[in-house]
Amino acid sequence: MNKPAAKEVVESRSAQKPLLDVNAIGISFGGLKAVQEFSLQLPAAGLFGLIGPNGAGKTTVFNLLTGVYEPDCGEIRLGSKRLVNRKPHQITAAGIARTFQNIRLFPDLSVLDNVRLAGQLRNQHGLWSTLIRTRGHLREETMLEEKALDLLRIFELQDRAQELASNLAYGHQRKLEIVRALATNPQVLLLDEPAAGLNPQEKMALAQSIRQIRDRFQVAVLLIEHDMPLVMEICERIVVLDHGVTICRGTPNEVQNDESVIAAYLGTGLTDE
Amino acid sequence: MEQTSPPPQGLVANVLRGMMPFAVGIIFASLLHFVLPGMIGRYYSRIVTDIGIAIVMAVSLNIVNGMTGQFSIGHAGFMTLGGYTAAFITYYGSMCIWGDTASHGGFLGRGEWLFAVSCLMGGLFAAGAGYVVGLPSLRLRGDYLAIVTLGFGEIIRVILQQTGPLIDSAEALKEGGWSQMIPPPVGGALGFGGVPKYTNLFWVYTILTITIVVAYRLKISSIGRAMISVREDEIAAQAMGVNIARQKVLAFVIAAFFAGVAGGLFAHEPGVIVSPKDAGFQRSFDYVIMTVLGGRGSISGVMLSATILTALPEFLRDFEQYRLIVYALLLIIMMLVRPQGLLGIHEIWNLWPLRRSKVSTATPEAKS
């Protein structure tokens, strides 16, 4: 365990200007305040966790960050870019990619096409060059395909490239979602319960590969996860939500020993008072 | 697999490569035009012409319904709009140029070029309408969008019924001045008769070729993938950086363009009087059935089903009054046995065993 070393890295990173700077965003649906005053400073290549009991508003935070919902108040910045009021595809183009809690692959597209589609975000070409197949167009299509295959090779999915995404095994589908998100070439990767439904071995492998992804692609990762051992092992810092309110933030050690977190997960004793 | 081959060398080679399918299509169309009527007679040639127009309609509708997954049932509205526009140009154009509305110039003569331009204009006009109809698709989905497109077709039908009577001579056209153009003199509820009959196998199958090549190139390109991703999952598509608003409107515009061109062909077909009721939902439904039956997004599947569904009623003529029942029964059986359509999401060339083995060997090659 090299925890002290990791801690130093974290501190030197957070001393710099954060890559993703979320400042007091909030949203309410009717009378329900789903998320209130949520703030987060995610440094470049940081690996943070977002946890909380069911219904705490974790996925809502993701939806706010990716533009699916518009925050009622607050500010989101990625580097120097302001992201509030942008469309989801513009936010992806700005550099935030995500996976989904319930897998949302394109089931009738091949594995390769799923990845290629995400990769083409930064190589848009016109209708005309597509229809008459200009040389530039053909070159770009070949390049997109190669890039997608490269990425699949890194994650050892290349043998499945021609298969339909819906025919993949569940664990592979989860993996493909991450590959697809990476294909958009993001600076920040939001993973929504990537370990859900995986067996213990797969979870171990996932923990490894999340770290590797962070190092290899130099992306900052924000992770929603219910699997506590996994979160505690890989996350540098953790934010805990309960009923839309941030109840704790800190290193895994601090969070594990925080009374309000224990209360949120296990409830408070009656007789203690 | 066209998309995995390396880019060809040299500009000339590339242009040739890009234009090759069109050239082959035009040669095929000329062959049909000159050889077929002699072989099978005029009645069957007419059916082959109808099949060609139906394929253009079904393949273009498939870009919206099949690839992009937006349920449009107003496709005949675009067709009729394009048809009226094209007919207006050839009818009054011929009057201004030659003083009458007969066909002029023979094969590829001046009249036919006027006709080709009019079809293009019909397509562009319909594409403009497609843009307008595409806009609500940004906010509506599923059944609600279907109702909007249905309403569009009906609006076109009603507007065309309110148009003015035809001006039937060049003199009257010159004397009347501009005021007679409002409402447009396109025949009202009676339909637009007397249009010069330029449509023949050559033009139908040339345009058919263009439609298919465009649809296929779209499908295998990144634009097509973006459209398909909208069909598969809009939220995920957005999260992958697809501008879904752009893809939907683009699909509507392209589909409407080809429907408009097909309308031009239809309006100039011998024995046809294009009339407001062609914009109604009955005709739109015919094309929806073709796309559903062919398989969503499958170009060859839709071509197959358009061919079958156009030819079938003709071959069922022997059963006279029973033929509509047989037709309906076949549809029901089809939906029970193969709800995903004839070819599902596949293309006919993907089902070919030879092709399939090629696809699977392509992967190890790409690895090394």
Image (spheres, grey):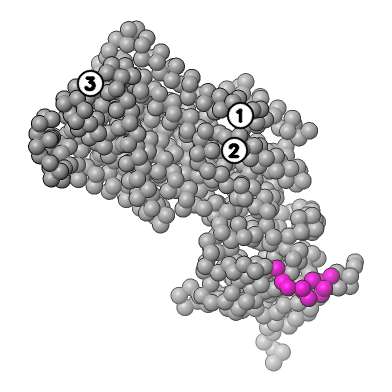
State which quadrant residue A240 falls in: bottom right
Question: Disc 1 designates what residue?
Answer: B11
| Mark 3 and mark 2 residues within 8 Å of each other at the beta carbon | no
Q: Quadrant of the N terminus of chain B?
A: top right
Compared to residue B113, the image places residue A135 above or below, namely below
What kind of secondary structure does the magenta stretch mostly adopt?
A: helix
Question: Disc 3 designates what residue?
Answer: B103
Side of A215 where B10 appears, left or right: left
Compared to residue B11, the image places residue A201 above or below, namely below
The dot on residue A216 is: none
Q: Chain of mark 2?
A: A
Residue beneath the point at 27% across and 44% down: B153
Residue B236 in percent (x, y) is at: 56, 53
State which quadrant residue A18 falls in: bottom right
Q: Chain of mark 1?
A: B
Badge 2 element: helix
Q: Chain of mark 3?
A: B
Residue B26 in percent (x, y) is at: 43, 20
Residue A12 magenta = yes
